[in-house]
Image (cartoon, coloured by chain):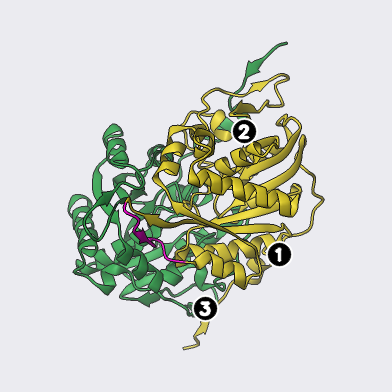
Chain colours: A green, B yellow
Amino acid sequence: MDKKTVGLSDAFKGNMTPKSFSKNPIKGTKFTIAISSAKGGVGKSTFAMNFALALKSTGSKVGILDADIYGPSLPKMMSIKNKPESKDGKSLVPIEQYGIQCMSIGFLVDEETPMIWRGPMVTSAIKTFTEKVLWNNLDFIIVDMPPGTGDTQLTFAQQIKVDGAIIISTPQEIALADVKRGIRMFDKLKVPILGLVDNMSFFETDNGRKYNIFGEDGVEKIAKNYNKEFLGKIPIDIDLRVAADSGKPLVEKESDHKISKLFIEFAKKIKKNYF
Amino acid sequence: MDKKTVGLSDAFKGNMTPKSFSKNPIKGTKFTIAISSAKGGVGKSTFAMNFALALKSTGSKVGILDADIYGPSLPKMMSIKNKPESKDGKSLVPIEQYGIQCMSIGFLVDEETPMIWRGPMVTSAIKTFTEKVLWNNLDFIIVDMPPGTGDTQLTFAQQIKVDGAIIISTPQEIALADVKRGIRMFDKLKVPILGLVDNMSFFETDNGRKYNIFGEDGVEKIAKNYNKEFLGKIPIDIDLRVAADSGKPLVEKESDHKISKLFIEFAKKIKKNYF
């Protein structure tokens, strides 16, 4: 029997190298920072909201674009229930909350409606959010990216001038495989990686015992291997989760909490190093 | 000024109600069970692998189809490094490991290569996996679904006879929003929901203190509200994570571990209730 093992066909491979495109900044904004993770559920949205608020607390004008069409978290995490206004039926006015300009697909449909959409519909929604939202004089727009390396990532990388990406991961092996793919994707798409964050790094009990629930130091090692900056660790923290669930992120709710201070440090570091 | 708030345009809405299609079982298999979560990072793949092995331990012939094109976990979790064989250059022979027939996009590319693909490419890969893989006389095929409600979910629901879906979630509020969307999606697409699982339900320290890191009882409440079966809770367990990271899922590695027993109970319950 003539056995042979197979890889990906040439047709599929041909599609794996993206072409280059002309890239524009999002109108009304100076710098675009993508918060990314390749893998879902690693705390990316919680990071994005708190990081945006931390940037605001350092004096910048900030917006958040929730680019996760299938799983928008912004409306709940930022306590926004109203629909955005449109003056001309085409453009959308972002909704301001806690001093941050916000936009999410979750503003346009009720919470429980799933967006059962194929890729081109997602691309079209992302274009609306980047071209038709009246972002007003922002220093930074924080983009909360969906997991994966698909339509949303491609649309941003090809059509938007993304000034940098921050990659969030938990330290377990199986998440790190996705981080490696994420780094390779941004490198391929020529989006600068500002740094990696080790999230849900460990859990500390009330009497100070630490448990490395998801493993240890994985993200830092990858940062070294790929020659990227390691921004730091964020422990699993019940206050952080409760604040996000309650609709007021910890940095806004309790700016002198030790975890809030971590976010403010990250924000200062990023501003000092890159902008 | 003429202000008005806006929802989704009619063009977008029109695309939200899927058409009906003729659905076929995956060739070579009797029953297809989708493991789904809408949200990523809730332990879906770990559940899928251990659940498949639990079904096997009850005497069934089982396969796993890793449908997560952007973040395949199967190769690492099941320790598979070789590429699949093809006898005719068109079909693919699944790779058997621990008595389970397996297929994943991760077999066809190296671990670090990101699949930077738009939706139609993903759909094409999913069609290859459901139509061109020589699954051999399986009782159950377990499909490890990607997060979201997009191309992969639509392709399965429209073209494959999916006998049931199990929805996995952690109990925190922000994940539950995604669970609600997931339930609504499967209901819309007419895929029966076999039950909901509360994963990473709590963390127990060495001296028996329990921490509800991600909240409490959220999944069970949603199951009740939506009149779906609640299958049970799985605690955060370091052995479970370490086994998955090491390439030998806990049910295979240590079948009498208390967590393995939970999976075997789930498998028995599902077989008894539905098949």
Residue A17 horizontal side relative to residue B11, left or right: left
Label 3 Cα crowd, 10 Å radius (few <14 / some 14-19 / many 20+): few
Q: Is residue A189 above or below residue A151?
A: above
Q: Are marks 3 and 2 in contact (CB under 8 Å)?
A: no
- Residue carrying label 1: B17
Query: Is disc 2 placed on a helix, strand or loop?
Result: strand
Quadrant for residue A242, please give it.
bottom left
Residue A273 horizontal side relative to residue A155, left or right: left
Whole-percent x, y for residue B267 in the image: 64, 47
Q: Is residue A110 above or below residue B164?
A: below
Residue sitting at 62 percent across and 33 percent down? B103
Disc 3 or disc 2, which is closer to the eye?
2
Residue sitting at 50 percent across and 42 percent down? B71
For marks 1 and 2, the one nearer the N-term is 1
- Residue carrying label 3: A88
Quadrant for residue B61, please give it.
top right
Can residue A115 be seen at all in this image of the molecule?
A: no
Label 2 Cα crowd, 10 Å radius (few <14 / some 14-19 / many 20+): many
Q: Chain of mark 1?
A: B
Label 1 Cα crowd, 10 Å radius (few <14 / some 14-19 / many 20+): few
- A87 inside magenta stretch: no
Disc 1 or disc 2, which is closer to the eye?
2
Residue sitting at 38 percent across and 55 percent down? B203
Quadrant for residue B141, please give it.
top right
Whole-percent x, y for residue B254 in the image: 49, 36
Q: Say which amino acid is labelled 3.
A: Asp
